[in-house]
Image (cartoon, helix red, strand yellow):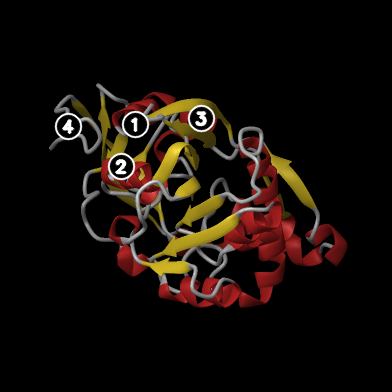
Amino acid sequence: MLCPLCNSRELTAKTILNQGNNNLKKEQGIFECRKCGLIFADDYLASREHLYTENYAAWGADILQEEQAISLSKKEAFRCQLKILLKYIRPAGKKFLDVGTGNGYMMEVAKEAGFEVWGTEISSAAIAIAEKKFPGKIFEGRLENTVYIDDFFDVISLTDVLEHLPNPRETIREVERILKPDGYLFLISPDTDSIWRTLLGKKWFQYKYDHVCYFNRTSLKYLLKDSGFELIEFRNNVKKFSLAYYDAYFQKYSFLGIGNFFRFVFPLLPKLIQSWSFSNPVSGEFLAVARKKSNL
């Protein structure tokens, strides 16, 4: 077995508890690379595309009645996160690609900010929703299979995507190809250096079967440097979601009994409180901004 990031054989084998939909947990073998710091599933090359159905994640079709609340909450969270990126680039006239756009929430927020937007997605159910919002702007399939020209985009975002990639080097190199010199890569992904991973150990809530590669600052810098990027900002990701969003999420992904708590308490709350949003500084994720190195 070789590390999919640095090809090292210096690996430490461990066992974790993967959490799937409906809070079903099962043991999963992982490896931690002692050279670059990447953690990856022992079966990271096994296809997981069957998971990305209309009921994937907490905003699937089986909870369609919460779609409006989830949409508002997700877009509010993305607005807060994009403020970090907007320190570096003015959106007017700039091209923005959202990889793994899902229902197109990030595209909506980026367009609202002034970007010209495109998206990619592998879920046909999500594409059906996003395509209605952005006709002709959604590519169905993996980024590596797109036909975008070299140096086309000013910004490419991968939010909650990096951890799903079995070959992150291949994906980020494709990002480098289609991103303009001095263009920006915007990333959000689980952080293996987070305090929650330290406290929860093998039961960390980011350990999920659809997550195959886990990064921290060290492994991310290795990936970016190898692909022609420089990391210019790395910080804890502070999420801002409504109680309605968390109720939907924890019905599928729960830990420490939080799902049961929401199941009994949330319906008793007034509608106004159910829609109340608050910041969560312990998401266990990082937010990063990287710049493609200029050819000059």
Can residue 119 be seen here? The reply is yes
Nearer to us in this view, 42 or 122: 122
Q: Nearer the viewer, mark 4 or mark 2?
A: 2
In the rendered structure, which disc, 3 or 4, sits on the residue that comes first in sequence? 4
Q: Amino acid at mark 1?
A: Gly
Can residue 250 be seen here? The reply is no
What is the crowding at mark 1: few (fewer than 14 residues within 10 Å), some, or many (at least 20)?
some
Q: Amino acid at mark 2?
A: Arg
Q: CA distance from mark 4 to mark 2?
A: 16 Å
Helix, strand or loop at mark 2:
helix
Nearer to us in this view, 117 or 12: 117
Q: CA distance from mark 3 to mark 4?
A: 25 Å
**Label pair 2/1, CB-CB below 8 angstroms:** yes
Q: Quadrant of the N terminus?
A: top left
Helix, strand or loop at mark 4:
loop
Nearer to us in this view, 231 or 71: 231
Task: Identify the residue under disc 3.
Answer: 194
Q: Amino acid at mark 3?
A: Ser
Q: Quadrant of the C terminus?
A: top left
In the rendered structure, which disc, 2 or 3, sits on the residue that comes first in sequence? 2
Task: Identify the residue under disc 2.
Answer: 173
Task: Identify the residue under disc 4.
Answer: 7
In the rendered structure, which disc, 1 or 3, sits on the residue that comes first in sequence? 3
**Which residue is painted at 73% across and 56% down in the image?**
243
User: Could you say where residue 178 lies in the image, as x and y percent from the top left?
Assistant: 38, 48
Q: CA distance from mark 1 to mark 3?
A: 26 Å
In the rendered structure, which disc, 4 or 2, sits on the residue that comes first in sequence? 4
